[in-house]
Amino acid sequence: MNQTERVLILGAGINGVAVARELLSNGISVCMIDQGDLSQGATSKSSRLVHGGLRYLEYGDFSLVKESVHERGILLDLAPHFVKPLRFAIPLAHRATGVMSSGLRFLSGFRVPGAHWLNNQFSFSSERGMYLVDMGLTMYDWFASKGNLPRHSVHDVGEPGLPAINKEKFRWIACYSDAQMRYPERFVVALLHDCRKIAQQKGLEFELLTYHQLSLKNRNVQLTSLRHPSLNHELFVPKVIINASGACGDLTLQQVDVASPRLMGGTKGSHIITFNQTLRDVLGEQAIYSEASDGRLVFILPFGDCTLIGTTDVRVEGNPLDVAASPEELDYLVGMVNMVFPQVGLTSADINLHYSGVRPLPYQPEGKAASISRDHSIKEYEGPSGWIVTLVGGKLTSWRAFAENVTDRILKKLGKSYHSESKTRLIPGAEHYPQTPDILKAEQGRLAEKFQLSLASIQTLWILQGTLIEDILDSLPDCSSELLPGTNIPRQYVLWTINNEWVETIGDLVERRLMLIFDETLDAATLQALAECLVETGRLDAAQIPATLESYQTHLTKFYGKKVH
């Protein structure tokens, strides 16, 4: 490899992977490392939405809304297997409230002197009324006018086809369109498959090392495996180091001895998932975007057979990877659901799992957490450690645009021209994607017959891989002889996943490859079988299985509240 052209990326979340993909497309070899697994931070702990940022209008962040709705349209076209349109409903109780507080939030977004002080000093009603929301959605439709999603509409509560919300509290429902990405973890894996494909086509090197750390001395990078300490890697000098470690960005700079003012001030967002069937029935196939008692907007989202509720917005300190949902946050989200759907009577016992992550937001020492900008930027450092670029901010929606900005900046500094093909390049698994539900059903039926698998197995694998699944199943020696216990997933597919999708641990499989964490029940027999697959592929010693399973169940309890049956 030409050492002068080598770029090192720290962090394998969606932003780091997106930058790697852009650099490879422009002829630059990439080495990417992460101290944990892919998508282990904010990428896998988000609300799983691809949205235009309706709330950002209230803070006057028009450029971010414009970028977000544009990127939403691109993703709906390029990743139909991962990104689906979703209709949202906003419950409304009053006609004209919230104008003053919303106006002050709008002015504070433009840093108008005194606006922030007035909003905190006086108790203006913050509840957004029907007129205000209708005006905001009209503006939102204008930003998204080039898209194909339906425009907004306002309805009386109780109209057929709408969620059965609280008639005693709410009088209207305002509906608008956005999109959902159910499994961003799988989306990142698909991007990495594309990175590998691009590198092969262009004769470049692409290396991804999870569970690794680096030491940096006189610009020389030394990589060390955290799971296999005896594994040695060559010393090399990267042309640029891209710090894409998200909310851990400041900790990463400290690790490489870069003196920097605080860049990250992320807030914690917690979510819950419930399989309460009454809630799922009254919600239907639309999402709720409702205002809680404290003025924060919270989502209630259809999520397969279950319901996803989130999120909170709490300032935190310390290591972002150590956060977990607090009892107070769980009660807050349960209470939010019962305010909108009192007939459900949701309780904490209905929570199947919870998760929490820290947003990679810019540091803002004062003000409400909701007022911190969700935009993205880059911060550069040049010194004894070399050229280091830190990514600040970023969202699940705008990853591609952010990667374009970062790559353009890097190539200009290297004296190279930048071109982008990511606006039109399909995400792997989207090739020849069925255009209608009937065609999709027929295609899945064909695959079930071809591989002698149940339709449920094909549908499960389709969600993970899209149209790639036929080539993957074709490559397996025997995909129908044995299923992973407690699932519809062929055991041979699990082995393929371990060998081809950068798997090291049982958590990688459960939480970020096979997505079993979101199954209603997670069986001990399933975990045992996964451990045996790791042994078979050389990732785990057989003698370590009991301790590994015990440790992992402790992890599931602490960070997910997930029970193993």
Image: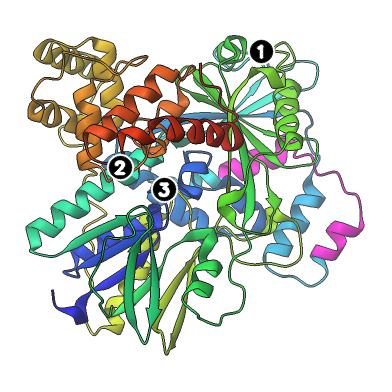
The residues bearing labels 1 and 3 have C-alpha atoms spaced at a distance of 40 Å
Q: Which mark is residue 158?
A: 1
Q: Where is residue 173 in the image (x, y as percent from the top left)?
A: 65, 25
Give the labeled residue for mark 2.
503
Q: Is residue 353 visible?
A: yes
The residues bearing labels 2 and 3 have C-alpha atoms spaced at a distance of 12 Å
User: In terms of sequence position, does the residue under pointer 2 or pointer 1 come before the other?
Assistant: 1
Q: Which portion, as a residue range, is magenta?
A: 116-138
How many residues crowd mark 2 within 10 Å: few (<14), some (14–19), many (20+)?
many
SS of the residue under disc 1: loop
Q: Residue 271 carries which label?
A: none
SS of the residue under disc 2: loop
Where on the picture, by quarter, is residue 560? Answer: top right
Q: Do the residues labelled 2 and 3 touch (CB within 8 Å)?
A: no
Q: Are marks 1 and 3 in contact (CB under 8 Å)?
A: no
Task: Name the amino acid type tagged 2.
Answer: Val
Tag nearer the camera, 2 or 1 = 2
Residue at 65 percent of width and 36 percent of height: 298
User: In terms of sequence position, does the residue under pointer 2 or pointer 3 come before the other?
Assistant: 3
Front in this rendered view, residue 415 or 207: 207
Q: Is residue 425 visible?
A: no
Q: Position of residue 538 (x, y in %)?
A: 23, 40
How many residues crowd mark 3 within 10 Å: few (<14), some (14–19), many (20+)?
many
